[in-house]
Amino acid sequence: MRRFKDRLAFALGALCAILAMIPLLNILYEVVKKGLSTINLEFLTNIPGVVGQPGGGIGPAIQGTLILIGLTTLIGVPLGLVSGIYLSEFGNIMLPIVTRTTEESMKLVPNSIRDAATALGVKKWRTTLSVVLSTGRNGVATGILLSIARIAGESAPLVFTILGSQYFFSNLNSPMDALPLRIYRLALLPYPYAQAQGWGAALVLILIVLALNVGVRLATRGRLYSKRSRP
């Protein structure tokens, strides 16, 4: 009976996961179907063309997106990471996504690991950084990836911050382009070529986020395996 309940719970969980993936797979199929034919070297490297005339690309938008991801990650990840560590190990504060996932990941680390480090005379801050944070690495990486995916796809805040531009990045005091903003503006144009470019830009954005996810996962897995292999 217990085995039957276990299998039933597993089957229901798998069914729920499949049902949740159907809308996502449908969206991915539509993006790939409508955007793949648009992607070529010219589309990826050129500046946007004249409105109403076919041609042009999303080069400045790709560059701007990568710059924004780099800057926001440089500012947001350390702040969220430190806040999550403080929330889990020392006090009570609130910051979204990275903070919460860091907190929950570190709470999953058994107290016996902390006690073992303390018994060896390791200081609290060293235990937190070298033992607890290292053990909860996978959960922390998930929170960072979720936050990167979140900021990479935001469009509304970009309208009032980076403003948008048809040219490549020059300096931080000038307007710049980004893929979410470019997708939004292309979708508003009543031209078939513009809508096709919008699908292509959406596919490029998905591929960038996917590449970041795979890269971080591989880097994290490599470090985890190297530590496990040590005597």
Image (cartoon, rainbow, N blue to C red):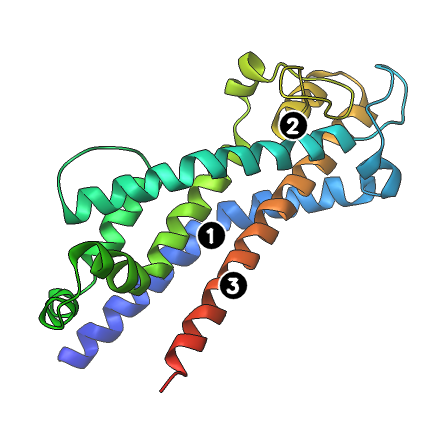
Residue at (33% x, 44% y) in the render:
81
Q: Position of residue 159 (x, y in %)?
A: 57, 15
> Comparing marks 1 and 3, which lies closer to the viewer?
3
- Amino acid type of the residue that numbered disc 1 sits on in the rendered structure: Met
The residue closer to the viewer here, 134 or 195, is: 134
230 lies left or right of 1 = right
Quadrant where the image shows the C terminus: bottom left
Give the distance between the C-alpha atoms of the residues marked 3 and 2, in whole angstroms.
27 Å
Q: Is residue 151 above or below residue 211?
A: above
Element marked by disc 3: helix
Element marked by disc 2: loop
Q: Position of residue 108 (x, y in %)?
A: 20, 60
Quadrant where the image shows the N terminus: bottom left
Give the distance between the C-alpha atoms of the residues marked 1 and 3, in whole angstroms.
26 Å
Q: Position of residue 6 (x, y in %)?
A: 21, 74
Image disc number at residue 219: 3
Residue at (20% x, 63% y) in the render:
109
Q: Classify mark 2: residues with Cα within 10 Å, few (<14), some (14-19) or many (20+).
A: many
> Comparing marks 2 and 1, which lies closer to the viewer?
2
The residue closer to the viewer here, 195 or 70, is: 70
> Comparing marks 3 and 2, which lies closer to the viewer?
3
Q: Which residue is mark 2?
A: 178
- Amino acid type of the residue that numbered disc 2 sits on in the rendered structure: Ala
153 lies left or right of 188 = left
Q: Position of residue 126 (x, y in %)?
A: 24, 59
> On the image, which quarter does residue 228 sit in?
bottom left
Question: Disc 1 or 3, which lies upstream in sequence?
Answer: 1
Element marked by disc 1: helix
Image disc number at residue 195: none
Q: Which residue is mark 1?
A: 21
Give the distance between the C-alpha atoms of the residues marked 2 and 1, in whole angstroms.
28 Å
